[in-house]
């Protein structure tokens, strides 16, 4: 069977690429080994799908996409904007709300986004094959041949939208990277991103009693900082602030945690010394933070005595712990729980406007398989829509 375009991977980027190519009158085949299209869309945002972020634009998003070349994403993002996807969502009558920091979520189930995209694919005449394993991809004189378990198909253009390695239980593999290597494209280092961080046994034993406790915090790594919720787990640390910083953290690095964001800890401690002089340090911290966390910090500080007797020097030590608590993770939970894969197909080998491989006519890479990773909160979906759209205009 011959098509104009074959798209490998029926996730967000693949469906968008197929829709846009189909709209141009191209005969499109979209293939995935999964039983359903858009499985990651279905589970995203706690089942509500954080489908974009209003700040995922070239004006606000310049520093919110990680890549060896962070400017690579700007071309696609400037031509397919959050407003354009929002208009599509509105057209299908899907209601949504802004949760925080520009994050847009469906009011109803995430499956509404899947239904919308499947509807657009039908209108565009896209052929969808699910539960279809890919055996081999080869170059032909006129394009590409894709060999499946029981059949094959050819096309002038091939769009690779197979995603990264994150959440392998949903079928994620490194197949897209293998194809890139097969056709001579370079890869940057890949690693889990937007992922909880873990600690060595001794530190974990101390943190375990805090499992389930959440706190507002600023989590820092070098010059990068995120002010969002932090969550203690039985494995280490999670929550939005940790997931965000995990994309910047590397093994061997420390992170710093400000447990009183926007508050003057020194002034709060001096006031406590005046007003509650006959209590211990755990009690003072317990008036500022969850009790179990206060107990842990108090034990770490090991400052016995009544708070009213504490010198300014001791208060400075406590302030430093509250505003700059240094922790050293030993690893992450890995691809098993990572929301995205950092790194991927090297953008030096791709055209930023079309997502085409520079040295292989007709070959395109879109979405997570490319070395472009956004912040938590809808940025990666917007990259999927934008990169898929860009390839769909050209393939």
Image: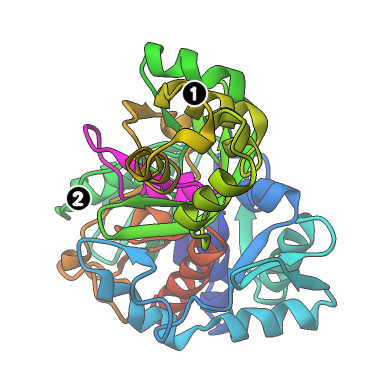
Q: Which residue is mark 1?
A: 305
Q: Which residues are magenta?
A: 239-259
- In x, y percent, where is residue 171? 53, 35
Of label 1 and label 2, which has the lower sequence position? Answer: 2
Residue 141 seen by the camera = yes
Nearer to us: label 1 or label 2: 1
- Packing grade of label 2 (10 A; few <14, some 14-19, many >=20) is many
Asked if residue 242 is among those painted magenta in the image, a careful observer would answer yes
Quadrant into which the C terminus falls: bottom left
Tag of residue 187 = 2
- In x, y percent, where is residue 333? 44, 28
Q: Residue at horizontal 72%, vertical 63%?
A: 113
Left/right placement of residue 139 relative to residue 64 reads left
Tag of residue 57 = none
Q: Is disc 1 in contact with disc 2, using a CB cutoff of under 8 Å?
A: no
Left/right placement of residue 153 relative to residue 33 reads left
């Amino acid at each position: 069977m011959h098509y104009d375009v074959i798209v490998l991977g029926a996730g967000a980027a693949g469906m968008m690429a197929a829709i846009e190519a189909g709209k141009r009158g191209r005969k499109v085949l979209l293939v995935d080994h999964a039983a359903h299209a858009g499985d990651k869309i279905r589970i995203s945002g706690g089942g509500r799908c954080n489908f974009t972020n209003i700040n995922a634009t070239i004006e606000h998003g310049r520093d919110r996409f990680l890549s060896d070349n962070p400017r690579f994403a700007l071309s696609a993002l400037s031509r397919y904007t959050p407003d354009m996807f929002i208009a599509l969502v509105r057209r299908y009558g899907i209601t949504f709300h802004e949760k925080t920091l520009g994050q847009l979520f469906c009011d109803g189930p995430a499956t509404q986004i899947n239904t919308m995209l499947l509807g657009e694919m039908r209108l565009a005449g896209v052929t969808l094959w699910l539960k279809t394993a890919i055996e081999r991809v080869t170059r032909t004189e006129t394009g590409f041949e894709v060999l499946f378990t029981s059949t094959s198909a050819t096309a002038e253009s091939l769009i690779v939208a197979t995603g990264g390695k994150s959440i392998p239980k949903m079928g994620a593999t490194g197949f897209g990277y293998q194809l890139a290597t097969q056709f001579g494209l370079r890869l940057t280092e890949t690693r889990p991103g937007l992922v909880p961080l873990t600690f060595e046994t001794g530190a974990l034993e101390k943190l375990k009693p805090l499992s389930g406790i959440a706190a507002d915090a600023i989590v820092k790594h070098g010059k990068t900082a995120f002010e969002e919720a932090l969550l203690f787990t039985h494995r280490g640390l999670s929550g939005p602030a940790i997931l965000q910083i995990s994309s910047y953290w590397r093994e061997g690095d420390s992170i710093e945690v400000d447990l009183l964001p926007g508050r003057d800890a020194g002034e709060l401690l001096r006031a406590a010394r005046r007003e509650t002089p006959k209590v211990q340090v755990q009690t003072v911290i317990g008036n500022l933070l969850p009790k179990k966390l206060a107990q842990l910090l108090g034990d770490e500080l090991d400052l016995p005595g009544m708070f009213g007797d504490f010198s300014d020097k001791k208060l400075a030590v406590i302030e430093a712990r509250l505003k700059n608590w240094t922790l050293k993770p030993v690893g992450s939970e890995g691809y098993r729980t990572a929301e995205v894969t950092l790194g991927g197909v090297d953008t030096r080998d791709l055209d930023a406007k079309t997502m085409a491989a520079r040295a292989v006519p007709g070959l395109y890479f879109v979405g997570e398989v490319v070395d472009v990773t956004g912040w938590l909160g809808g940025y990666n979906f917007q990259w999927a829509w934008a990169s898929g759209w860009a390839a769909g205009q050209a393939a």
